[in-house]
Every structure is written in structure tokens, then in C-alpha cells.
Image (cartoon, rainbow, N blue to C red):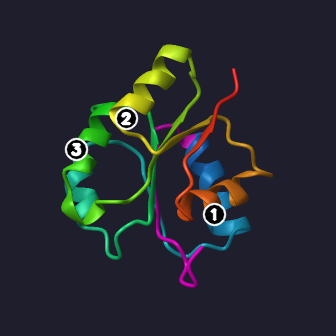
Amino acid sequence: MSTTEPVILYVEDDPQSRKLMSMLLKGRMKLPNVTILEDSENIVANVEALNPKPDVILLDIHMKPFNGFEMLTMLREIEVLNGTPIVALTASVMNEEVQKLRSIGFNGCLSKPIDLETFPDTLERILDGETIWRIFN
């Protein structure tokens, strides 16, 4: 991981998941640059307004108005995000969905609920450029 604190964006509509991730990232991991969006409305404008730009984006897949697949497509068109890892977080990890996540261009997938013990290491590995598909059925 770089010497500067990573900038994290998490897009999640479930209040419990947002609270858990906030406690983990801001509280336990003491990361100061964390943005959590509660819906996917205006996702492009919201992401373009972020300064500094995120080093990693964590997307819930099952959201409205745009699902994770649609958000990924929109975010990949933002030039300043070229090379930014975008990782899916989902509670439903059926084989066909995982294949779709891979083929559409996600940089990895983490099943929910996230593992609080391994997540800090997992996040560091993602920031170091590793592609992680941590999926439990």
C-alpha cells in the first residue's frame, strides 16, 4: 500500500452494511478518506465531485436505480478512474453472477457479510493491485 492514506468509495443501499463498513474503515482501520453513498442515483456526478479521487471503489450489486453492473459501466467511462480497482460486494454469489461480474470487468468480488478479521488485509491487497475473488456460498 502507498504511504498516503487510501481514498475509499463504498456505494451501498443497506443501512446496516453502511454502518458496519463505516465502523470498520473509519473506526478500526482509522482511514480518513472514506466516502459512503447510500444509493446509486447521480453516481457519475457524485464520483466526479470527489476530491481526491478514490483509490478503490466498492459497489453493492443489488441497488436502485442503477445496479452494480450498470454503475460499473458508467464509472469505467470516467477517465480519471482509469486503473481504479472496482470491486463488487454482494450477498448473492451464484456461479452465473460471478461469471458475469468477471466478464463485465469487475476487479474482484467480496461476499457479504464481509469478514471483519480479513478485510483490512484484503483491502491492502486490492490497493496493491491484486485481484481478489473471495466468494463463499
What residue sits 57% from the left and 54% below the top?
130
Q: Identity of the amino acid at label 1?
A: Glu
Mark 3 lies on a secondary structure that is helix
Q: Identity of the amino acid at label 3?
A: Met
What residue sits 31% from the left and 41% below the top?
72
Quarter of the figure with the N terminus: bottom right
Residue 27 vertical position relative to residue 78 in the rendered view, above or below: below
Residue 71 in sight: yes
Quarter of the figure with the C terminus: top right
What residue sits 74% from the left and 44% below the top?
115
Mark 1, residue position: 124
Q: Quadrant of residue 45?
A: bottom left
Residue 13 lies within the magenta run:
yes
What residue sits 55% from the left and 76% below the top?
32
Q: Residue furthest right?
A: 117
Q: Identity of the amino acid at label 2?
A: Gly
Mark 3, residue position: 74
Label 3 neighbour load within 10 Å: few <14, some 14-19, many 20+: few
What's drawn in magenta, residue-wise? 1-15
Q: CA distance from mark 2 to mark 1?
A: 22 Å
Q: Are marks 3 and 1 in contact (CB under 8 Å)?
A: no
Residue 67 in sight: no
Task: First in sequence, mark 3 or 1: give its number.
Answer: 3
Q: CA distance from mark 3 to mark 1?
A: 25 Å
